[in-house]
């Protein structure tokens, strides 16, 4: 009887302690769930089961900068003084101006890095810095090899107010205001399906030795489009230039990589400096393969768009309707290009409409 009374008297205390313990355990469980949820968004596991930062994804919402914080980037593109390059630069700059001051844009200043060594007739129309080309014969007819050398010179000579830089190309058209997609030490880049470091490991290892890490450290990218902190690019650019030249001088590498050699060189140079990129598939679209503009930011019109009058793609064969930038090597395309026939993808229609709008509003268009 006495025992029962003692237990009865102890029950409230015991219940209180049990309730307290239950609350504490519940708090710990919820905390672990929340913490693990964040970790899964922020990191990935490597082959040893150790959690490490994984930048090869779109940055999770919970680590993006607050919307009110702006990180403007400087738009920079390398170019030649050839008519083919000039008219593309004029269209690109036109659309930069249209999108720059939009609320969602973080575009800052603009520079065309002209690596012809002398001024041209667009100096007053487009902000331009003239830099030297590579010494004669060093590019071996591969004009793109001048790109890293142009960036090295520009970074040394220019006063760049922005902390970030977008490396762009003349055949880019901004279809939406572009925010800064980079995140501190992680630049943002577009993944190209044809840049395959793992499939070309034998060649990549000539320039990225095993002691630097797995070949998967080399991202499937080129230098453009890339948004990157200026201080990172200042470190990468000289290495990018040297790796490009070494690749071009190696017969096997030159043969296998061909016209994308300089893209591989940038990817390797970045990996050599321990820089990995956030891969953003929404960075860019490439007609005619990408059918809709969707929520992407840049049209890259590097491929020819050939269709018959039924709206069917005839790639590899000149179509009854076509738009191909290579049809205008010696001068700009005419104003008011004909629109594609019914059935052609929206991305191609948007491209032609945007070219037409630009050429209709750029003064003295035929003088490119």
Image: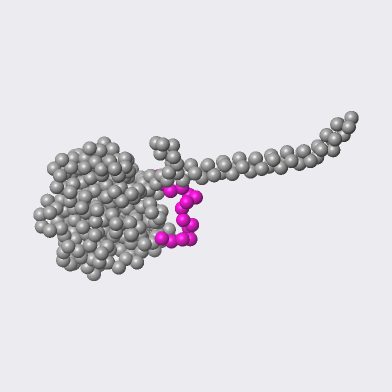
Q: Residue at x 30, y 44 (%)?
A: 212
Residue drawn 24% across the image and 52% down it: 240
Does the magenta-highlighted stretch encompass residue 62?
yes
Residue 138 visible to an observer of this rendering: yes
Q: Quadrant of residue 80?
A: bottom left
Relative side of 42 to 6, left or right: left
The residue at the point 29 percent across, 59 percent down is 234
Tell whether 331 sits left or right of 309. left
Q: Is residue 75 above or below residue 256?
A: below
Magenta portion: prevailing SS class: loop
Q: Most extreme residue toward the bottom, as rendered?
A: 124
Residue at x 32%, y 53% (from the top left corner)? 226
The verdict on residue 177 being magenta is no
In this orientation, which residue lies closer to the viewer: 337 or 127?
127
Which is nearer the eye, 38 or 130?
38
Give whichever of 262, 47 is nearer the camera. Answer: 47
Q: Is residue 144 visible?
A: no
Q: Residue placed farthest to the right in the image? A: 1
**The quadrant where residue 253 appears:** top left
In the rendering, at what x and y percent does residue 225 appear? 31, 52
**Magenta part of the protein: which range?**
57-71
Residue 349 percent location from the top left of the image? 31, 48
Image label count: 0
Residue 76 lies, in percent from the top left, at 28, 60
Identity of the residue furthest to the left in this view: 137
**Quadrant for the C terminus in the image:** bottom left
Q: Quadrant of residue 359?
A: bottom left
């Amino acid at each position: 009887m006495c025992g029962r009374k003692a237990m009865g008297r102890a029950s409230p205390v015991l219940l209180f302690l049990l309730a307290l313990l239950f609350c504490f355990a519940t708090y710990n469980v919820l905390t672990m769930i929340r913490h693990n949820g964040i970790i899964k968004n922020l990191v990935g596991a490597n082959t040893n089961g150790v959690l490490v930062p994984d930048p090869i994804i779109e940055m999770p919402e919970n680590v993006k900068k607050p919307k009110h914080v702006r990180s403007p980037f400087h738009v920079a593109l390398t170019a030649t003084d050839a008519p083919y390059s000039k008219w593309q630069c004029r269209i690109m700059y036109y659309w930069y101006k249209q999108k720059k001051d939009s609320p969602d844009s973080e575009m800052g200043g603009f520079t065309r890095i002209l690596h012809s060594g002398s001024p041209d007739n667009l100096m007053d129309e487009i902000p331009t810095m003239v830099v030297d080309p590579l010494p004669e014969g060093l590019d071996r007819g591969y004009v793109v090899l001048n790109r890293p050398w142009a960036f090295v010179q520009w970074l040394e000579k220019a006063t760049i107010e922005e902390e970030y830089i977008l490396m762009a190309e003349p055949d880019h058209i901004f279809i939406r205001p572009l925010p800064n997609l980079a995140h501190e030490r992680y630049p943002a880049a577009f993944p190209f399906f044809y840049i395959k470091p793992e499939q070309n490991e034998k060649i990549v290892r000539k320039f990225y030795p095993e002691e630097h890490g797995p070949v998967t450290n080399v991202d499937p990218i080129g230098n453009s489009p890339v948004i990157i902190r200026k201080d990172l690019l200042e470190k990468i650019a000289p290495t990018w230039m040297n790796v490009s030249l070494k690749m071009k001088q190696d017969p096997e590498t030159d043969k296998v990589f061909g016209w994308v050699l300089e893209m591989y060189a940038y990817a390797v140079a970045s990996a050599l400096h321990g820089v990995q990129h956030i891969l953003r598939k929404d960075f860019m679209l490439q007609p005619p393969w990408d059918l809709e503009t969707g929520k992407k930011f840049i049209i890259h019109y590097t491929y020819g768009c050939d269709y018959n009058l039924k709206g069917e793609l005839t790639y590899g064969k000149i179509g009854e309707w076509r738009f191909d930038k290579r049809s205008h090597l010696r001068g700009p395309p005419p104003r008011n290009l004909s629109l594609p026939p019914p059935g052609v993808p929206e991305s191609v229609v948007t491209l032609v409409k945007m070219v037409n709008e630009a050429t209709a509003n750029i003064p003295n268009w035929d003088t490119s």
